[in-house]
Image (cartoon, rainbow, N blue to C red):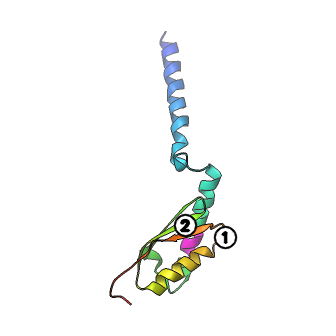
Amino acid sequence: MTTIRSTLATAATVFALIATAGCSVGRGQQSVGAYIDDAAITTAVKAKFADDQTVSASSISVETLNGTVMLSGFAKNAAEKDNAGKLARQVDGVKAVKNEIAVRPGTN
C-alpha cells in the first residue's frame, strides 16, 4: 500500500514539474525557439549600444518579444534616443522597435 502511495506521489510531482516548466519560457506567449531568438536579438541590440559612443548602454533597457524590441530608460537628448532606435532596427531579426526612451529635461 505504501509503495502505491509513494509511486502516485512521485508521479504527481513529476507531472507538476513538467507542467510548470513550460510556464517559465513565455507564459504561453511564444515557443522556446522564439524565446531563444528574442534573447539573441536583445543581446545583439545591447552589444550595438555598448559599441556605439553616442548611446549610453547602461541607461537604456532592451526587451524583445516576438521580434519586437522595446526600448526604455533615459537619454541625454533626442539625438541619443533616435540613434538608439536606429541601432536597434539594424539588428537582424528585428521586426519592429517601440522606442519609449525618455529624454531627461534640461540635458540637451
On-image quarter of the C terminus: bottom left
Q: Nearer the viewer, residue 18 or 74?
A: 74
Magenta-span inclusion, residue 46: yes
Outermost residue toward the bottom in this view: 108
Place of residue 45 in the rendered image (x, y in percent of width and height, measured from the top left): 57, 72
**Which residue is tagged 2?**
69
Q: Is residue 69 above or below residue 19?
A: below
Label 1 Cα neighbours within 10 Å, binned few <14 / some 14-19 / many ≥20 = few
Place of residue 48 in the rendered image (x, y in percent of width and height, measured from the top left): 57, 77
Secondary-structure class at tag 2: strand
Outermost residue toward the right in this view: 92
Q: Is residue 23 above or below residue 70?
A: above
> Magenta part mainly helix, strand or loop?
helix
Bounds of the magenta segment: 43-48
Q: Amino acid at mark 1?
A: Asp
**Which residue is tagged 1?**
92
Mark 2 in CB contact with mark 1 (< 8 angstroms): no
Q: Is residue 89 above or below residue 31?
A: below
Q: Residue at x 62, y 49 (%)?
A: 31
Question: Which mark sits nearer the N-terminus, 2 or 1?
Answer: 2
Q: Residue at x 32, y 88 (%)?
A: 106
